[in-house]
Amino acid sequence: MNQLANPLHYPLAVLAGGIFLIAGVRLVRLPSVVAIPGAAAIATAGAAVLKTREPATIELDNPALSKELQAVRQQAQKLTQTADLLKTEATQVLTNAHQMELLGTVQYACDRTDALPAQIDQLARRMQGKDSLLSVADLEKQLQDVQAKIQSNSGVAQIQWQNLAQRLERNIALAQQGEDTRQAQLAQLSTLIAEAGGVLQQLQNKLRTTDFTSAVATEELRELSDEFKGVQESVEVLVG
């Protein structure tokens, strides 16, 4: 039998119980001996329902690695929430006909973030019971793909791909030495998600302060959207 969920870990369940308690005492005039247990029961039941909706936690054979994986997953969920808020804000700000292309660019960048938590869960499943996520041959294939990206891009995008190439080269060296590459991969993934969050913050700031009658300012927003997509593509290489 599953353990009961702690309502204190689920604010919405506590809120539901509180509403029942206040409404029961003040509006329905329920006696406290009925209202208080009823509120507790509603909070407990609500917490149980919310707990069943949570994704199953994937544990690794290394407790420290599992903890790091959970931290990366929380990072990804927070990034997704931030991207959703930014998309809503962009929809409210970019309303003129000539801004629709720019709006589409921002929305596309934000939408791609929705898949990140599920991608990390897939990564975690592949990490279970393995000393190395990918073989040297797989890592070298990834590196070849990234080197092709370096050749076909320029500016900020090229720098992003060069940084990822350096990360993959370190992973290859670890794998060749028979070392566990999982911690390095999670650390690199955490760094990339943090970079994506930083670019999202810049996007939000620019969205709130940009004079969209200025072609230069509008182009800066577009460049930030492209930079954010570039970081996302780097993340997808690591999780894929």
Image (cartoon, grey):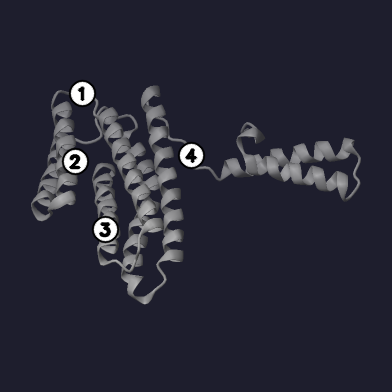
Label located before the other in sequence (1 or 4): 4
Q: Which mark is residue 85?
A: none
Q: To which residue does mark 3 refer?
A: 220
Amino acid type of the residue that numbered disc 1 sits on in the rendered structure: Glu
Q: Which mark is residue 56?
A: 4
Disc 4 versus disc 2: nearer the observer: 2
SS at circle 3: helix
Disc 3 versus disc 2: nearer the observer: 3
Q: To which residue does mark 2 refer?
A: 164
Label located before the other in sequence (4 or 2): 4
Q: Looking at this rendering, what residue extends furthest in the left direction?
A: 151
Amino acid type of the residue that numbered disc 3 sits on in the rendered structure: Glu
**Residues at marks 2 and 1 touching, judged by CB atoms closer than 8 Å:** no
**Residues at marks 3 and 2 touching, judged by CB atoms closer than 8 Å:** no
Query: Splitting the image into 4 quarters, where does residue 218 fall?
Result: bottom left
Q: To which residue does mark 1 refer?
A: 179
